[in-house]
Image (cartoon, grey):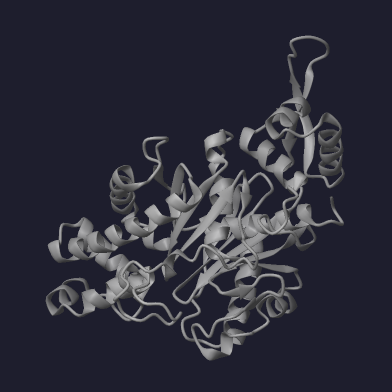
Amino acid sequence: MRSFGADTRMPTLAVVLDLIRARGSASRVELAEATGLTQATMTHAVRKLMQLGLVHEVGTAPASRGTPRRLLGIKADACSMVGIQFDTYSATGVVVDPAGTVVAQRELPAPGQRPPQEVVADLAEGVRLLLKDAAVPRERVLGIGLATYGPQDREAGVLLTPQPTPEWQGHPLATSLSAATGFPVAVENDATAAGIGVQTLGGSASSSASSFAVVYMSGGIGAGLILDGQPYRGVTSNGLELGHISVDALGPPCHCGNRGCLDEIAGPITTTAQARADPALAHRIAPGADPLAGFLAVALAALDGDPVAAGLIDTSAQRLAVATVTLVNLFDIGRVVLAGKAFTDIGPVYRDALQTVLDRAVFMRHVHPVQVELASDVTQAAAVGAAAVVLRDLLESPDTA
């Protein structure tokens, strides 16, 4: 399985399908011009996509000379993919068609501290219910994409961390979920999946939309990167750990071995712990035992004007902004998208805080602007991206191309 960043060959079929999805319809000539591919390469790619049943001709458009150009569109009913995002505190499932439309969605039981076997059984039941909701026959399902935290072995479908309990480390997650559902399973980093999801849901064909970073915050903080329309995964798909950038060299130790990591001093778990440590605030908002639910309660209190809650959110946002400046400076990107359940209500506050800091602190600010925005659906972006990964893996397979 090829990973952009580890292999310089561009996955042609995925590039072409993404472009058709973004434009709604396009001719072969337009696709060749947009991608820089030769007409012969484009003809082969389109023929292959049509053989796979993913693309068909949907009409014509006038040409400056000669015969009208035949337009290509995506066959939305060609197949379906299931996407699941989960971390310790939340889980969401979706069914997505090749056009990027979410045809079914469910909140699934959060893993919590439960053993992987029990969680996998819940996920399998969630898949069954999602397909029932979507009225999709099993034979039309390409597979399941699973977006979750790292570090992970993406190729083997295994988590390489003892989170949330030691039983999870090395558990054959993809294999066990595949056995429980009968579908192939692909594992992806949740922040990378969110980037792919933003791309799938966004529908923008502009060049400025082809490269962007995702700042992902749910149970923890991470980042994903889309470069020239392709996910950057590094060597092992475990890069861009924004939550483990140190923003305080003398800060508290982190389980990763570093000190003052962003996640340790600005993430939802820490913000909720700070709220619980203030008896008056804890009494007002009742954050409960679930750190993500607690963070959402702090966020709502801040939006309602609670000054203490607003202060906690501001501190978190300012520290996240400092780390995001580093991310932007490293990759010279012009767009940062916020995604993840932690941004459900408070997203606009974080967006505005990051925009203010980036406007004054990004190194290349006099060369080009950096736009901060919210994903069109912050809660579903990673799950949608996980579903899209299933189709991308098919298209990027040497056996397919």
Q: Residue drawn 77% across and 54% down?
A: 396
Q: Quick one: 258 or 314, which is closer to the camera?
A: 258
Q: Is residue 10 visible?
A: yes
How many labels sit on residues?
0
Residue 374 on image: x %, y % = 41, 48
Answer left or right for 25 relative to 147. right
Residue 15 on image: x %, y % = 70, 43
Q: Residue drawn 73% across and 14% down?
A: 62
Furthest-top residue in view?
A: 65
Q: Is residue 137 visible?
A: no
Residue 166 on image: x %, y % = 54, 90
Q: Quadrant of residue 74?
A: top right
Q: Quick one: 104 or 53, which is closer to the camera?
A: 53
Q: Quick one: 368 or 81, which is closer to the camera?
A: 368
Quarter that holds the N terminus: bottom right
Answer left or right for 62 relative to 383. right
Q: Residue drawn 33% across and 66% down?
A: 247
